[in-house]
Image (spheres, rainbow, N blue to C red):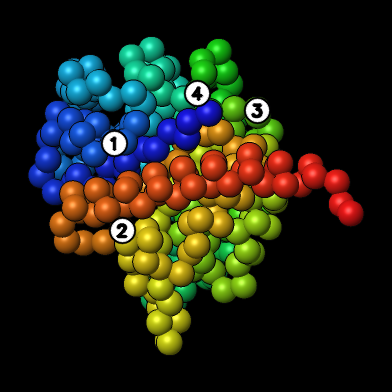
Amino acid sequence: MTTPIIMHVNYCEQGQDLSDICRKAVAWGFDGVEFRQRRFTVEEKTEDYLSALECAVRESGLKQVIFGYPCLDMNLRDAKARQEQASNAIGFYRHVAERFPVTVVNAFASLVQNLDPKVPGHDYGKQGSFIATEEQWKWAVEGFQALADGCRDTHLKFAFETHMLYLHDTVAATLKLVERIDRPNVGVNLDYGNIVYFPGHPAIKETISQIGKRLYYVHLKNSIQLFDGERIPTALSEGAINHREYISTLLESGFDGPVCVEAPRSGDREWYAQQDITYIKSVIADCKKVRPAQRRADSQPTR
């Protein structure tokens, strides 16, 4: 079984148009691209955006399309405004399910930021799920229950990215949100590259085991930690996260969904995309070779 490799659009948000993005992703060897729900640098109607994207996907031969941030803002005090958010999201995702080969959505609930000016934005233990009110949890649950129910007859799954500053920042908080929503088409997008920013984070094997069958999508990126605790983004192959262990553990767990490579670094991101996919394709191929050999070795009787 092949593992679909997705390119995050942030490799090509330096002025490239949609046709360039799709064409280059295919040429570099990616199976798909994770786009955003809208382009923030272009004034356009949703229908125009989707039509242009549909044309670019068709002409390039891109196999998969995934949509990500923004998803559904439920951090609004007005109940009618929240209902409108959910209704608009249902309409959008039902529409894209008909037009694109979409299987999973990289889902985001609302930002939950500490408004105390004395608390730095990078102090993630004082943001997101750590300070969220029960009201904010309730609103997010209600919104995504509506979205999940409104799309239940499609093939879409919504996977919350483990991401700082959101309700779904840590693995525990993300699972709490998923469990409270309690819909089979709502699960987790594990971004372990974000998890490592939290002190005392669980190891890769423990993290994947905790999520279990609710793991619908995976993001990959890397970084190194400095002596003062800050982290610097790196190439996928050069940081502290061992992606050979990551991929091996995913395969052992039975995960068969897409993996998406991200570009958190500034600079020539098109070159980074080619570096990163070469590395991760090699890792995936190696891990898939090891698994049958390991099974044969494990099946041999002991003497």
Does label 4 or label 2 sit earlier along the sequence? 4
The correct choice, above or below, for 28 with respect to 172 in the image is: above
How far apart are the two marked residues, 1 and 2, measured between alpha carbons?
A: 20 Å
How far apart are the two marked residues, 2 and 3, measured between alpha carbons?
A: 31 Å
Q: Nearer the viewer, mark 3 or mark 1?
A: 1
Q: Which residue is mark 2?
A: 264
Q: Nearer the viewer, mark 1 or mark 2?
A: 1
Instruction: Please identify the quadrant where the C terminus is shown.
Output: bottom right
Q: Secondary structure at mark 2?
A: loop
Residues at discs 4 and 2 in contact (Cβ within 8 Å): no
Q: Position of residue 156 (x, y in %)?
A: 50, 23
Q: Which mark is residue 156?
A: 4
- The one nearer the camera, 40 or 10, is 10
Q: Position of residue 48 (x, y in %)?
A: 18, 21
Describe residue 212's horizontal placement relative to residue 170 as left or right. right
Residue 26: tell me if it is visible.
yes
Under mark 3, the amino acid is Pro
How far apart are the two marked residues, 1 and 4, measured between alpha carbons?
A: 24 Å
Q: Secondary structure at mark 4?
A: loop
